[in-house]
Image: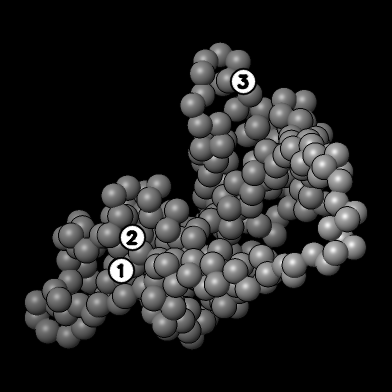
Amino acid sequence: MRAGMIEEFSHLSQFKNLKDFNNNVEMFLAEHKNDFTKGEYIAFMRLTKFAARVYGVANCKIATLVSSCHDKLGGISRSTAERMIRKAKKLGILTVHNTTRKKGGFAHNVFIFNRFDVSKNDKLTDRQNAQTLTPVKDEPTKSEQETIHPLKTNNNKNINKRNETLDHTFTSDRVPFAFTNLVKCFFDDAKKIEAYWNRVQIAAYRNNIETRTDDVLDIAIDSFKQLIGKMKRSRVRDTLGYFYGILDKKMTDLYFEDLLDLGFNFKELQEDCWLSS
């Protein structure tokens, strides 16, 4: 494969748009995030940013990937980036192609993100549910049959029906109190509150700021307020999706602000990522 501009590899993309690519990465990380070390995870998330122009395709050098990971935490080594690539290939999310120059010799690599195949995991989950979550009940004994009362059965059904919607007091402890306290004013539903916070965590992982808990919480609160303002002015069809869009933009802006503070040279990054060697 000959080296070239990133657009020349657009036919290798397996995704219809950036949202489709991001969703695929999130599904993969839901299963395999713990397979990476902290440094490898940083390298993987930074590689996904290089693959945003042509959805799921990046042609950066490993040296460029390593240099772009140098931040306040000290960055990563080349060996860490190479280990991440090997793991991602083994897990099936990444395919790597070598390129050559016109005058001979190797040039940059082309990294192709594959669609994450969840069918095997789904089948395994189905089998586990069948074996552990729905055990076969023994036939009731005669004494048990005699104690069954229709009114008691109806009461149990009513209890299950009431529990379908739980207020904010049932929200998981992993959701910060300040966020719960805000969202409950508009959606007093534990399931919805946890769903909104889940979007916050996904956006934080994508932008590699999940450890900055105070910044993440501040952005989450500001983003939810912006969502409510939008809902007051006009109809929002997908509130979770709109909320996630606000989060991702704010967190991406924070990421680039940090790079500017470090004096990062964006022009060199673009030349290494988008142009051939």
Residue 60 location (% of width, % of height): 33, 68
Residue type at the position of mark 3: Gly
**SS under mark 3:** helix
- Residue at 45% over, 60% down: 25
Q: Amino acid at mark 1?
A: Ile
Q: Residues within 10 Å of mark 2 (few under 14, many from 20)?
A: many
- From what the image shows, is residue 25 above or below residue 136? above
Q: Identify the residue at image location x=17%, y=85%.
A: 105
- Relative horizontal placement of residue 107, taking residue 131 as reference (left or right): left
Dot 3 and dot 2 residues touching (CB under 8 Å): no
Query: Measured from the top left, where is residue 42 in percent x and y?
Result: 55, 68
Question: What amino acid is found at the position of numbered circle 2 in the picture?
Answer: Gly
Task: State the SS at label 1.
Answer: strand
3D distance between C-alphas at marks 3 and 1? 39 Å
Instruction: List the residue tagged with mark 3.
Output: 229
Q: Quadrant of the C terminus?
A: bottom left
Label 2 vs label 1: CA separation?
6 Å
Front residue of 218/119: it is 119
In the figure, 230 relative to 266: above or below?
A: above
Name the disc covering residue 199, or none.
none
Q: What residue is shown with label 2?
A: 56
* Distance (Cα) linking label 3 and label 2: 34 Å
Between 251 and 232, the residue placed more toward the observer is 232
| Circle 2: element type | loop
Task: Identify the residue at image location x=43%, y=54%.
Answer: 22
125 shown above or below 207: below
Q: Are marks 3 and 1 in contact (CB under 8 Å)?
A: no
Give the colour scheme of this rendering. Answer: one colour
Tell me, for residue 112, which label it has, or none. Answer: 1
Q: Spot the residue most to the left.
A: 103
Residue 200 visible at all: no
